Amino acid sequence: MQWKNGDTTNGQVVAGGNGAGRGLHQLYLPTDVVIDKETDSLIICDENNRRVVRWSRRSGTTQGEILIDKIACWGLAMDEQRYLYVSDYVQSE
């Protein structure tokens, strides 16, 4: 959900929004999100689907793109050079 600053009643769905599930148009227990400003996209840790996905913030986007598959992701970070860091709680990495 995207919330405008100061508006706590009118959120807008920007990723998922199609119920929990395994499709690329769905998320299933997202645990973290970072914004990639260069690509204007959200990078989401989709924990129960064991993947990290990218969702464009541009209008008309209907599904995510898998960046990393088969990972028990829990947290995300991105540095100034756009290196993505992902914590994997099963591998303790």
Image (cartoon, helix red, strand yellow):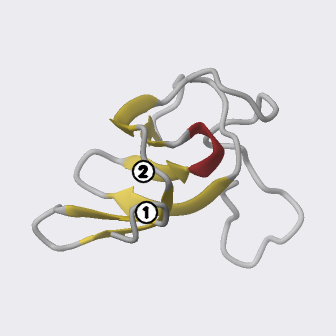
Q: How many marks overall?
A: 2
Circle 2 packing at 10 Å, graded few (<14), some (14-19), many (20+), is many
Q: Secondary structure at mark 2?
A: strand
| Residue receiving disc 2 | 43
Say which quadrant the C terminus sits in. bottom left
Q: Residue most toward the front? A: 91
The circle on residue 70 is: none
Determine whether label 1 and label 2 are within 8 Å by CB: yes
Q: Is residue 7 left or right of residue 37?
A: right
In the figure, residue 77 lies in which quadrant?
bottom left
Q: Position of residue 58 (x, y in %)?
A: 45, 35
Amino acid at the residue labelled 1: Val
Q: Nearer the viewer, residue 76 or 36?
A: 76
First reached walking from the N terminus: tag 1 or tag 2 = 1
Q: Is residue 79 left or right of residue 46?
A: left
Q: Residue most toward the bottom? A: 6
Say which residue appears at 52% left-offset and 30% top-offset: 59
Circle 1 packing at 10 Å, graded few (<14), some (14-19), many (20+), is some
Q: Is residue 32 above or below residue 27?
A: below
Q: Nearer the viewer, residue 61 or 21?
A: 21
Say which residue appears at 39% left-offset and 46% top-offset: 41
Q: Nearer the viewer, residue 20 or 3?
A: 20
Amino acid at the residue labelled 2: Ile
The circle on residue 34 is: 1
In the figure, residue 66 lies in which quadrant?
top left
Q: Position of residue 51 (x, y in %)?
A: 47, 41
Give the distance between the C-alpha atoms of the residues marked 1 and 2, in whole angstroms.
Answer: 5 Å
Q: Is residue 92 above or below residue 56?
A: below
Q: Is residue 76 above or below residue 61?
A: below
Q: Is residue 64 left or right of residue 93?
A: right
